[in-house]
Image (tube, rainbow, N blue to C red):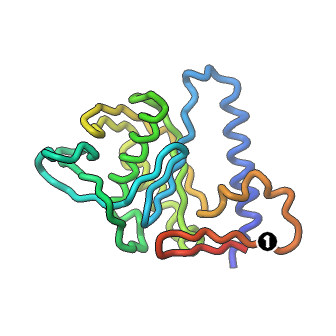
Amino acid sequence: MWNERKEFVIMREKILTFIEKNSRIDLKELAIILGVDAGYGNFKTARTCFPTSVTKSMSEPTISKDYVEYNGAYYILGDGHKDFVADKHEDEDNYVLTLAAIAKELKARGLNTAKIHLAVGLPLKWFQTQREDFRRYMLQNRHLDYRYAGKRYVVDIDDCTVMPQCYAAIAENLKEFKGMNMVADIGNGTMNVMI
């Protein structure tokens, strides 16, 4: 079995190196680290949370204003939840919901243009086998020009870090952990346990 603690320490060091390296540049040039938690029930960012239901349409919605316009299609966000998909990198809805999450987070910050470093997670069970595919999936378009709720968003994705889900809950205090520890991430029909 893969040594989770060692992997987490390596990731933490990469993040600290990234922060140190970028602390020497003009803050206007620094990418915003934007975390997206892609749950089956809800997508979450630091300032937003919304259900994972999405419906594709080729025409602009007449009633809903909660939609993403991307690649000539309209993706209407709704009130339901996604069905379970084991390979998130093979699911178009996951990408569109990530675009919505980015736009919602930027809107909450009063921005519609940004350079971001995307931080996303995968369940521990699939982290080792899907990490690189999921990273490529998230970086499929490094320059994005799309609309959310009728407003234009221009986003450059500088990079993407894929971490095990649950990691964010312990990363800051990892050095203080002694002995056996357990973190449970309870989601909408799923549960990840990290020991």
The reply to whether residue 92 is in sight is: no
Relative image position of residue 177 (x, y in whole percent): 84, 63
**Residue 93 in the figure: left or right of residue 38:** left
**Residue 44 in the figure: left or right of residue 137:** right
**Label 1: which residue?**
181
Q: Residue furthest bottom?
A: 1
Badge 1: how crowded within 10 Å, few (<14), some, or many (20+)?
few
The reply to whether residue 162 is in sight is: yes
Relative image position of residue 26 (x, y in whole percent): 62, 20
Q: Residue at x 79, y 54 (%)?
A: 173
| Above or below, comparing residue 108 to residue 187 in the picture | above
Relative image position of residue 185 (x, y in whole percent): 61, 68
**Residue type marked 1:** Asn
Residue 162 lies in quadrant: bottom right
| Above or below, comparing residue 6 to residue 71 in the picture | below
Which is nearer the eye, 161 or 103?
103
Q: Residue at x 35, y 67 (%)?
A: 82
Which is nearer the eye, 44 or 141?
44
Q: Residue at x 55, y 35 (%)?
A: 32
Which is nearer the eye, 191 or 130?
191
Query: How many labels sit on residues?
Result: 1
**Residue 87 in the figure: left or right of residue 192:** left
Identify the element where label 1 is drawn.
Answer: loop
Q: Residue at x 29, y 38 (%)?
A: 146
| Above or below, comparing residue 63 to residue 191 in the picture | above
> Which corner quadrant holds the C terminus?
bottom right
> Which corner quadrant holds the N terminus?
bottom right
